Image (cartoon, grey):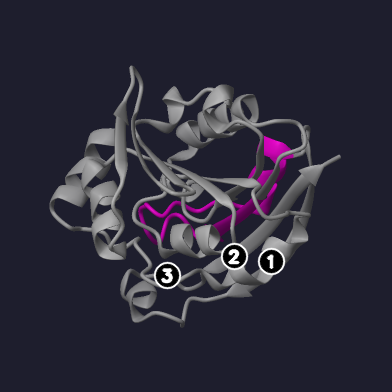
Amino acid sequence: MQEKDWLIRWQKNQIGFHDAEVNSHLKKYISASDLKPGDTIFLPLCGKSADITWLAEQDFQVIGVELSAIAIESYFSEQGLSFDRVESGRFITRSSRNIHLLEGSFFDLRHQDLGDCSLVYDRASLIAFDEPTRTRYAQWMRSIIGNDTDILLVTLDYNQSEMNGPPFAVSTHEIMRHFESAFQIDIIRQTEIVDESPRWRSKGLSSLVESVYQLGEK
């Protein structure tokens, strides 16, 4: 999956990865980070996620980055929000109150784009990349967030020979390899979910484990 492939998916409305509901793990486990109203939360590859609105309603500043203008404009349209549009060299930023969505590549982000970010919420970003790109993603993420920024990370793991990603299989061992040098890693939850949706069995999966990790300061 290259960046152009994701743009094509949005153009063709092939967005099975989009979840119209607020993620239950976000609502349940965000308290694991010591956040206060006004703190900034960053959503990589945010799409038009309902999580954006929920976080904004909790009085957080929300920054999202997303390649697709279709996704971002659909978000504001579906939420009934007007926005201001500012174009810079690397991003087109659309903002409405405490929501700021940047149209462009995650790999063009710099530390100053996120300010004093308190939490990264990654529900479906790491698993959107193949293994070489995941290594680059993890390295880039560590370079653009502060040392005291937590990460709430949701991943999937399965036998990669049974299905081609995305979503790609990411094991706990790989999470440790990418992040343990910089973070204390806690496994909050691991659940077998292969039977929660018929599509997983139809794709040939015998098992699908969803994991939730809290990555915090060592």
Q: Is residue 90 above or below residue 54?
A: above
In this rendering, does residue 66 appear at all? yes
Q: Position of residue 116 (x, y in %)?
A: 66, 34
Quarter of the figure with residue 211 = bottom right
- Which label belongs to residue 29? 1
At label 3, the amino acid type is Leu
To which residue does mark 3 refer? 205
Region of the chain picked out in magenta, as a range: 152-179
Which sits in the foreground, 211 or 57?
57
Question: Which residue is located at x 42 percent, y 70 percent?
Answer: 205
Q: Which residue is mark 2?
A: 26
Q: Looking at the image, can residue 157 be seen?
A: no
Q: Position of residue 97 (x, y in %)?
A: 44, 49
Horizontal placement of 11 versus 190: left or right? Answer: left
Of residues 199 and 80, the one nearer the viewer is 80
Tag 3 secondary structure: loop
Image coords of residue 30 (percent x, y): 67, 62
The image quadrant where one finds the C terminus is: top right
Q: Earlier in the sequence, mark 3 or mark 2?
A: 2
| Residue closer to the observer: 178 or 29 | 29
